[in-house]
Image (cartoon, rainbow, N blue to C red):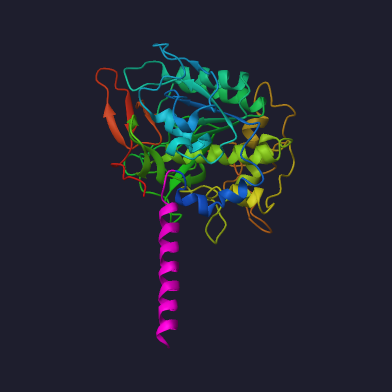
Amino acid sequence: MTPTRRALAGALALTALLATASEAQAADTPQHPWYFDTMRVEEIWQHTTGEDITVAVIDTGVDPTLPELQGQVLEGTDLTRSGEGAHVDGNGHGTDMAALIGGTGGGGGIQGLAPGVKILPVRSSSSGIDFDNSARIAESIDYAVSHGARVINISLANVEAGSGRTALAEAVGDAVRQDVLIFAGTGNDGMGLNDPAIPAALDGVVGVAAVDSGGERVPYSTSGPQVSLAAPGNDVPGHCDGLSGPACIWEEGGTSSATALASASAALIWSQHPDWTKNQVLRVMLNTAERSDDQRRDDYTGYGIVRPDRVIVDGEGDPGDPDSPPIFRDWEAALDPVATPAPEPEAESTPDGDSAPEPEPAPGPEAEAAATSGDSSPLPWILGGSAALVLVAVTGWAVLRRRSSASAGA
């Protein structure tokens, strides 16, 4: 090789190396996290960004003054005792969830998966002493439904029995009658008691688990029959030091983050197909989810990892009967008053009245199983997308924060 050709080859190799390094850096920033490539987000945005869809974020409030959330957040309401307003978030958790869903990336902030949606903040929790949270979440669901939310994101989890669960179940039933989808984190107790938590374990709620960039369920993600879907939970954008810190990449975000990304995925699909019912949106989400070769549901990632690109870009997934729920069919049929129109009960069911949990996938993965639910331990509310427990004295209530220190996105 001549010196000239050798120099040219070296220059080309260096250019390729720099381009590769640039891509690697871009794929690990709050404006371009790793799952943007996996989900082909930029291709999705050529079809829809989630416009005309309202996503309610039932959480600790949403701060609309952050650059990435300016113009994205509706008025909302504050149902906590403090009554400071839905735009107050002393915890930062609700704001992070809103940004993951609908952030624009403005000002170096978090880029959300569905930047065309509107965020309806419903402040139902705080980092301080709190009571009657179950009833408040139920009231929050009612508010979200009555104010036009098509998708409700609840990145909260609690293992609690009694009247609180009853109120929540009734609110979920009302939401189902209004054709609203509810996503909730299964919790971060996978390495502990792994108890099923509400609202994720309630019939009618889509329980979301967390996976890492390799598509593997993360150990802290609570597992069980309540898991319907999974979404990225690790290495997701957040704010390094509360709302005062810059956006960064959290090493372990938790099932809260996974729930937000599942909610955003539903909003994207619904925006492209505004005439679909909740049953059709959920059915294509389940049928196009990325799962293992055996194509069967498991208790760790449910029917698989959300892949809205397969629906929006590739046109995959059969929406099916608009009036037939892909899961919770027996439960919806038993609602009193029933959902309108009432779904036809399946012919074969398990002893507890839920449909068989392991449907045959051929010729395509049709997820027609009903997730079971159940909880009994009177443990405190936790934030599904966090992992370090902060105990609150006297009341026993707790707020979970991020699992590990944030590393700056590079």
Q: Which is nearer the eye, 26 or 274?
A: 26
Residue 94, given in percent of the width and then of the height, sits at 43, 28
Q: Position of residue 228 (x, y in %)?
A: 53, 43
Magenta region includes residue 7: yes
In magenta, the rendered stretch is 1-30
The correct choice, above or below, for 185 with respect to 335 in the image is: below
- Residue 197 percent across, percent down from the top left: 43, 33
Tell me if 399 is positioned left or right of 367 in this view.
left
In the rendered view, would you say 239 is above or below 44? above
Can the viewer see residue 59 in this picture?
A: yes
Which secondary structure is most common in the magenta stretch? helix
Which residue lies at the image location 66% right of the left edge and 38% below the top edge?
A: 270
Question: Image check: 285 left or right of 85?
Answer: right
Q: Residue 247's quadrant in the figure?
A: top left
Residue 388 drawn in magenta:
no
Nearest the viewer among 253 and 10 is 10
